[in-house]
Amino acid sequence: MDAHEIENLKARLGELRLEHRDLDTVIAKVLESAPFDMIQMQRLKKRKLALKDQITRLENRLIPDIIA
């Protein structure tokens, strides 16, 4: 992996982390409003989980394999 590709992955990782944090805020606001839409909440949580999975995959690509 070259330096340009690493920088692109780091930038994408930053974007995903920001979106993940933003979803925390959105979920908290939806929970404050009563009654809230359960389907909307499920979609938000599903999106947040998908983002977490993408973040983990990118982090694993950036960390080199270490043979023990």
Image: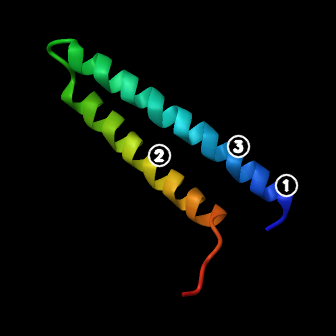
Which residue appears at 31% of the width and 16% of the height? 29
Question: Hey, what amino acid is under mark 1?
Answer: His
Where disc 2 sits, the SS reads helix
Mark 2 or mark 1, earlier in chain: 1
Q: Can you name the residue that lies furthest to the front here?
A: 68
Residue visible at 34% across and 43% down in the picture: 46
Gap in Å between the C-alphas at discs 1 and 3? 11 Å
Relative depth, front residue between 49 and 7 = 7
Find disc 1 in the rendering and name its residue.
4
Q: Mark 3, mark 2: which one is toward the viewer? A: 3
Residue topped by disc 3: 11
Amino acid bearing label 2? Leu
The label on residue 33 is none
How far apart marks 2 and 1 lie (CA) works out to 23 Å
Q: Quadrant of the N terminus?
A: bottom right
Quadrant of the drawing holding the C terminus = bottom right
Q: What residue is disc 2 on?
A: 51
> Residue sitting at 61 percent across and 46 percent down?
13
Element under disc 3: helix
Residue in the foreground of this view, choosing between 67 and 3? 67
State the image quarter where residue 37 is shown.
top left
- Decide which of 28, 65 is in the foreground and name it: 65
In the rendered structure, the answer to whether residue 62 lies left or right of residue 26 reads right
Q: Mark 1: which secondary structure?
A: helix
Image quadrant assignment for residue 48: top left
Residue 27: % across, % down:
32, 26
Q: Relative to residue 31, is residue 7 drawn left or right?
A: right
